[in-house]
Amino acid sequence: MCMDWKVLPTLGFKLPPDFPFEPYLQVNSYLDKYKFTHSEQCKSFGLGWKGIAYRFRTSVEYDMQFMNSVIKYSNSPPHEERYNQEKFLTGFFVNATSTVECFFFSTYCIASILKPEKFPMLEAKDLKFYPSDVARDFCKNFASESFSKMQAEFLKDPHYKKIKDMRDVL
C-alpha cells in the first residue's frame, strides 16, 4: 500500500489520495439528521456508502497487483502468475463496477427519505437497485434537479460503459 494513503475517519481505514474524501464525508454527515427519524433508510444507506469506500480501495489494490505482475512478468507469465493476473483483472472490474452500484444504491436510500412513496425501502433480500433504474426514477421524480441529469449522463459515459462491459465479459 502506498504511504500517502489517508485514513477515512468514519471507517478508520486507509484509502488512496484520489478517493473523494470531502464529498464522501459531506454526504455522510448530511444523513446524520435522519438517523433517528429514518433509521431503516439510514442503515441501508450506510451499508451502501461503506461499500463505496471498500470497493474503491479493493479496485485500487487489484489494479496495483495487476500492474506489478505485468511489469514483473510481461505478457508471457508462467501459468500460476497468469492465473493471478486474471484474478487481479477480474477483481478490479468487479469492484470498480460495484463502487458505482453502491453509489446508486446509496442515492436510492437518500431518495427514500425524501420521497418514500416513490422510493420504497424493501426487505433486505429485495434490495436490488440497478443504476439504470435508480437514474430513471431520479429523472422521473426529481426532474428539475441537476443531480438527476448527472446520474443519467454518467451511465452513458463511455468509460463507465467500458468498465461495466469488461466486468460482464470477465
Image (spheres, helix red, strand yellow):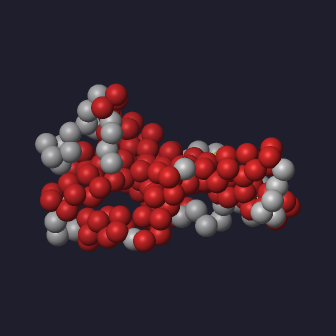
- Percent across and percent down for residue 101 are 42, 51
The relative height of residue 149 versus residue 80 in the rendered view (above or below) is: below
Residue 135 visible in the displayed image: yes
- Percent across and percent down for residue 26 are 45, 59
Instruction: Residue at 72% x, 52% y: name it.
Output: 85
Quadrant containing the N terminus in the rendered view: bottom right
Instruction: Residue at 80% x, 44% y: name it.
Output: 80
Instruction: Residue at 43% x, 44% y: name it.
Output: 48
Quick check: 29 left or right of 22?
A: left
Q: Nearer the viewer, residue 109 or 125?
A: 125
Q: Nearer the viewer, residue 80 or 119?
A: 80
Quick check: 143 left or right of 91?
A: left
Residue 25 visible in the displayed image: no
Quick check: 27 left or right of 68?
A: left
Instruction: Residue at 60% x, 53% y: name it.
Output: 92
Quick check: 170 left or right of 117?
A: right
Q: How many marks?
A: 0
- Percent across and percent down for residue 96 are 53, 55
Q: Nearer the viewer, residue 15 or 105?
A: 105
